[in-house]
Image (cartoon, rainbow, N blue to C red):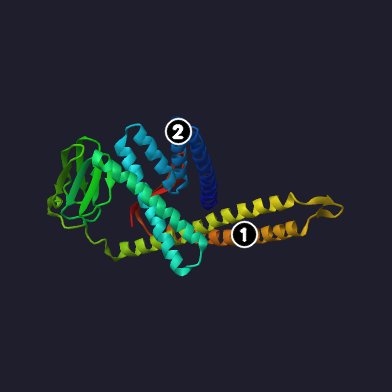
Amino acid sequence: MRILTLVWLVLFANIASADNAADATKAFEEGLALQKEGKYADACGRFAKSFELDKLAGRPAPGTQLNLGECAEREGQLRKAYVLFDDAALEYGRRAKAAETSLVKDPTSAELKRDLDRATAGMRLARERADALAPKLAKVVVRIAEPAIAGLAVRIGDRSVSPAAELIEHLDEGNVTITASAPGREPFTTSAKAESGKQVVVEVPVLEVIGGAVGAPDPGPRSRRQRKRVLLAAGLGGTGIALLAVTAIVGLGANSQYKDAEAMCSPGPNGLICPTAAADEIDSAGSKADLATVLGIGGSALVVAGAVLYFTAPREGVAIGPIASPTTAGVTIRGRF
């Protein structure tokens, strides 16, 4: 029963994700239309809606970020605009690199060349907009003495950033708090005054070990074996869930293809009479449905195998509890492995 519930949750999440992506595209196109009409406030509202739906669908949206950056700049929210332009430039850069890599394998692909040109143009535009705003903001440079500490978390103002030897943030004028923390280490916190058009440098020293502890004790061979078994179970279950997600996509596509083909047919004395193209489409939809069935069986088997491995593994203090929110559902697993 638990496994069936998990399967349905995964299928539902994938369908919801597809709906969010479609709604995001629609909201974005509405925003562009309103922008052309000069209705900037309404357009910005649609872009914001599109961006939130894209986040729910789990897909980057650099084009929406560019338009939202324009909205923020018009409203005088320079730091927000800078972050949006900067993030869009980074995402376009990732897309350009991916297109370049693919072109090495298929150098004659016109589609890949178009993707590369679009991504490169988007990256340049977004970077130009961010660079134009940078001099109007305060520049905070954070230098970390030991950025490779395990579990290091760094926060600059209201934003969490990935640790590095040197971090640069562009912020609105005012006091900014910088924090750094890691398991088993004394946290570091300081504040600095950020001024528009100026740079301030903050040095984060090596975080001191709490009580002189040098690390957690060896969990022992039994605990290590437990963890390996749990990781194997998670791998099998994750692969099974991925297959079930593919099953949902293929199955929905087959169903849609069948309905479209069926609409071209007409009733006859012995069933539907279909033109050759429609009959081919129906056969193709049937093959996809068969593939979805095979994938579903395989995915379910892997989920069952992972569940058996996990629930029969010896464990210490493991607690499992449900989680739910408007956008997610699943279980949490807490304990020592």
Residue 193 left/right relative to 112 = left
Image quadrant assignment for residue 48: top left
Q: Nearer the viewer, residue 79 or 240?
A: 79
Q: Amino acid at mark 2?
A: Gly
Residue at (61, 59) in percent of width and height:
292
Q: Is residue 318 visible?
A: no
Where is residue 83 shown, x and y percent of the image?
32, 43
Query: What secondary structure is marked by label 1?
Result: helix
Where is residue 118 shown, x and y percent of the image?
45, 53
Q: Amino acid at mark 1?
A: Thr
Q: Quadrant of the C terminus?
A: bottom left
Q: Is residue 190 visible?
A: yes
Q: Which residue is mark 2?
A: 45
Residue at (62, 59) in percent of width and height:
293
Circle number at residue 293: 1
Numbered marks: total: 2
Q: Nearer the viewer, residue 106 or 286?
A: 106
Query: What secondary structure is marked by label 2?
Result: helix
**Dot in front, 1 or 2:** 2
Circle number at residue 73: none
Residue at (31, 63) in percent of width and height:
224
Instruction: Give the Cα separation between the discs numbered 1 and 2.
Output: 42 Å
Dot 1: within a 10 Å radius of its alpha carbon, few (fewer than 14), some, or many (20 or more) residues?
A: some
Residue at the farthest right position:
269
Residue at the farthest bottom position:
105
Where is residue 9 shown, x and y percent of the image?
52, 47
Q: Is residue 296 above or below residue 2?
A: below
